[in-house]
Amino acid sequence: MLVCTDGDEICNDSPIEQVRLMVPITDDPTLPTLTFRTWVLGRITCVILAFVSQFFLYRQYTIRIPATCVQMLLIALGKLMAATLPSKPVKVPGTSWSFSMNPGPFNIKENVLLTFLATSGSDSPYAVTILPVKKIYYKKYLNFWAGLLMVLTTQVLFLLFACSGKNQSQLNLLAPVLVALELVPSPSTGIFGNLHGNFFLRRIWESTTASVLGNHVSVSLSDDFSSSIWCTSSYHWSMSSVASSWWLLSAVENICVPDKLPKGSPWTCPGMTVTYDNSVIWGVVGPKRMYYPDGVYSKLLYFFLIGGIAPLLVWAVSKYFPEKKWIKSINIPNILGGASMLQIAGAVNYWSWITVGVLFNVIIYFKYKGWWTKYNYVLANGLDLGVAFQSLLTSVDKWYRCGRSLSPCTVPYSSRPSGWVQL
């Protein structure tokens, strides 16, 4: 139900109710956007978030820090800089250019652009997983700078496609299958096929999706995209992710090898194991010997047919029962694709996600919409921040027990927190 009348000068006519409830419809074009605060905070948080995200990826239960958590932290930091930085213009030596370190109060448009910059590093580049797979599972050494260059090239490629407006969805299974069929079977074939066919387009989709958020708060497309370029296509995000991965591979003995790790160690790397399995399935064995015509899993190909027919069935049922509005909300790709992370996240994360989602976004949303509008996302961010902060505290080596020496700590594993990194 829209909230517009014939006499309204400004009409909140978004077809999505959640957007109408949460997103303001007014705009102040005088608000500054690409400020000194934006560039400084954005670059720093991008590097930190990329390092932390890659750090958590090696744990048994991976944690992904949501963008909304970062937004809340950036609001506090932005307001702190607005209260402390001088407002006097600073002149660039040798030029006629000048800028202000503090152009005014911290505003919503700065916060949105900071979110673009910071959350560019909220997800680990898929290319980084090639480093542990090559080193741990295939016992092959990959130079740090070669690995960094590999990661950078993929990020620049996806950025070029995003510039051209390409916003296709992921190829998922088809990418490694097609590459494996055309190229000579090898472990690298499946990994690079998935990298350039699946996650490559995923990054394009994430980049263009971020523009939607900027559009809601009337941030210009040039400011939106230039802020994304700075962190995504440059070395900030890539170097921080590679550095985090390289450090863990050197600091934690027998990382990603559960049989050799101490009991209860969190460094089992389920995400890396999935990447290794993919490299074996698509690269070493190959789709011909795994599925068809020589494989024993050929019947799994029927799921291609099921995936194509299922949405048509939902559409047909919705036409046959037009009074049942909820049928149109059934999203088969989300239902089937949601299981793609089950191997990494584990069933316990799915049950908690479903329980909390139904409670707040179904029961409370329909019965207590006023409370939901005001507190739902604040509560969600608080819960996410608490989990992320607690996990970071229990995962960082307690250096104060070891002194300033770089030698390994002698504290027994039984008294160490569950994510101890032995330096």
Image: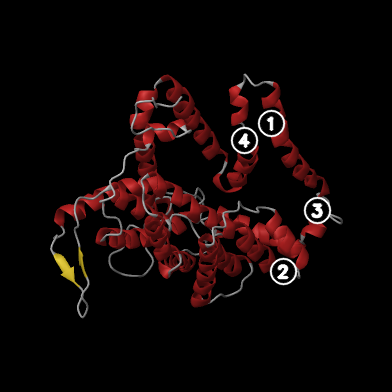
- Disc 1 marks which amino acid? Trp
Looking at the picture, how far across and down is residue 276, in whole percent? 64, 60
Are circles 2 and 4 on residues that touch, CB within 8 Å? no
Give the residue at x 13% y 63%.
Answer: 88
Query: Label 4, on which residue?
Result: 331
Note whether 420 is above or below 15 in the view shown.
below
Give the residue at x 63% y 26%.
Answer: 327
Give the residue at x 31% y 50%.
Answer: 109
Note whether 275 is above or below 312 in the view shown.
below
Query: Label 2, on which residue?
Result: 186
Query: Counting residues from the N terminus, which is met first, the one under dot 2 or under dot 4?
Result: 2
Query: Counting residues from the N terminus, which is met first, the one under dot 1 or under dot 3?
Result: 3
Query: Label 3, on which residue?
Result: 291
Query: Label 1, on which residue?
Result: 315
**Mark 2 and mark 4: span between their CA atoms?**
36 Å
Note whether 283 is above or below 4 in the view shown.
below
Is residue 423 visible in this depiction of the protein? no
- Disc 4 marks which amino acid? Asn
48 left or right, relative to 134: left
Quadrant where the C terminus is found in the figure: bottom left
91 left or right, relative to 261: left
Q: Would you call the spot at circle 3 few (<14 residues within 10 Å), some (14-19), or many (20 or more)?
A: some
SS under mark 4: loop
Q: Residue 125 carries which label?
A: none
